Amino acid sequence: MNGDPIIRLWGVAKSYYRETLEIPVLQGIDLDIPSGGYYALMGPSGSGKTTLLNLIAGIDRPTGGDLEVCGFALNGLDDDELAGWRSAYVGFIFQNYNLVPVLTAFENVELPLLLTSLGRRERREKVEAAMERVNLTDRMENYPRQLSGGQEQRVAVARAIVSDPELLVADEPTGALDSKNAEEIMALLEGLNRDLGKTIVMVTHDPKAAHHARHQIHLEKGVLDRTVEVNR
Amino acid sequence: MRFLHLILRSFLRSKRRTVLTILSIAVSVALVAILQSVLATLDGFANNPDASNRIVVRHKVSITNMLPMRYEEWIRQQPEVDTVMGLQWFQGVYIDRRNFFPNFASEAEYVTAIFKEEIVDYSDTQYRDFLRDRNGCIVGRALADKFGWKVGDVIALQSEIFPLTVRLTVRCIFKSKRPSDEMGLHFHYKLLEEGVFYMKGRTGNFFVRVRHPDDVPKIIERIDRHFRDAVEPTLSETENAFQLEFLKMMGNYTAIIQMITGAVLVAILIVTANTMAMAIRERTTEIAVFRAMGFRTGQLLFLLMGEGILLSVLGGLFGLGLAWVMAGAIRNVAGTFLPYLQNFSIDPGTMALCFQATLGVGLLSTFIPAYRATRRPIVDGLRSL
């Protein structure tokens, strides 16, 4: 953690609308997350933690306030610019892995690299390095249906890191896994933060998973309740 | 090109659905190709360039009313006229009605002169034999081959119009440029005159060959004006217009065929659109993941529409192949009793039209579901993130 904020939020608010009825989800969020940080977003259902993660990841837009992530004021980017920004700076890890079933593990991991100007050989090298990082080099030609849940999530992690993004966002990355596989994934994320300096923001309900993070941000009814440092 | 394997993998995601959709498109395209080719064939039949300087003169009231044979002499005296021939559609049945072929009572000495573009290759000796033998006939090679006729064979034709059966000896076999022109039979007009008392000195039509196509309108106008006040007034028209009159007896076939074609195209559009909408809808989350990873709207549209276009183009190509096979069958089966289908084929213009139509179907059917999928908020597409 080098201390410079990579994520900055000023008075961020998000409301959804059901016809004319406004349903506020987040209100007045002010937050700084330093580069290299590992934060767990926690809180009860409906507290707005996933919405906050979506805003940080640039896949949703706030209805109020400003946010700057990886040096970019996201409110000022149009949809295509935001897509380009995501491909360069953000890696996603989903609860249900969300691998493409008709592509092999190798091809799934290669997907983000198809958006770059890298040639076939360079892409292969990067994919192999990412697969090595998640210890799945022997499963590269397997389809998702031929992998266990834990292996699928490791492929998803490899996909998230293959383009070397600064920020990893994870939504309940262990939510669909048994405790052994969950522990492996958490160790993997911890290693990515520790060894590669990736900034990680993770939504989780699981206190064990949250314990792997360095900080826990607690949300309550759409507002920041408290941020605590994890003592190990 | 780096996205091509993504299109192919998605295309084969549900193999059964893909195959069934391709088959349904193929059958529809084959139907459209056949219908359009029928239209082109019929239009070609009524737009025969070889008939550009031929006129058909008939009774003004209808084609079933007869004209006096004496009109022929006056028509022949017109300086622009090269040859005139009395010709009567005989509608003779050879053994069975299913053996249909066009047969005419014609003034034998003028047959080759009037139809010189169709009767292009024959033996002079055989032709002289035909002229000499009042019971002789001249037949096309394709017709002779169909029934295994040889020179000297005797055949009987029982007319469905006249109370007459003629026994004819094949005296001459001719070849044409097109097989459809080899399906005709001509026999001596005298046989009809002698066999049917009310046809004495009368004929259904005069075929007139004009020296120059430019003179056709002038001659048509002059003939009709000359006989306008006669008891049996004439109606002259180009041979193509005359053929078109026959075709019109089938009704407004152009409108019918175009309506069926339109309905089939709409059906393909609906089938493909439904398939693509299903294929895209079941990938809502996947599309959202692609967008989250940074795929832009245009790139996703390319992927999704590429899949739809590939589907319809493959269906279209398969359909054209099917149509080609069907055209061969139509030529071999229907062509034997409908002479104008002897040359039936799917011409390159029809192929191009069908290919463009399937391309259009692919684009139209995929664009709306694909566009909607790319405009949907990412967070809606992801169940949770």
Image (spheres, coloured by chain):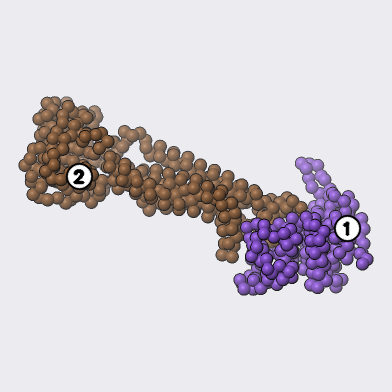
- Report the side of B171 relative to A151 (left or right): left
Q: Chain of mark 2?
A: B
Q: Residue B255's spot in the image, x, y percent?
A: 40, 38
Residue at which label 1 appears? A207
A2 or A40, which is in the foreground? A40
Q: Chain of mark 1?
A: A
Residue at which label 2 appears? B148
Q: Is residue B272 above or below residue A215?
A: above
In percent of the image, x 49 and y 48: which residue is there?
B23
In percent of the image, x 31 and y 41: which residue is there?
B334
- Report the side of B353 relative to B21 (left or right): left
B209 or B326, which is in the foreground? B326
Amino acid at circle 1: Pro
Tell me, by letter, which chain the rendering colours purple: A
Residue A101 is at least partly visible in this image: yes
Quarter of the image where one finds residue B69? top left
Spatial CA span between label 2 and label 1: 94 Å
Q: Are marks 2 and 1 on the same chain?
A: no
Query: In what element is the residue under mark 2?
Result: loop
Amino acid at circle 2: Gly
In percent of the image, x 60 and y 47: which residue is there?
B277
Quarter the N terminus of chain A occupies? bottom right
- Report the side of A152 relative to A219 (left or right): left
Q: Residue A60's spot in the image, x, y percent?
A: 76, 55
Query: Chain B's colour?
Result: brown
Query: In what element is the residue under mark 1?
Result: helix
* Numbered tag placed on residue B263 in the rendering: none
Q: Residue B164's spot in the image, x, y percent?
A: 16, 29
Residue A83 is at least partly visible in this image: no
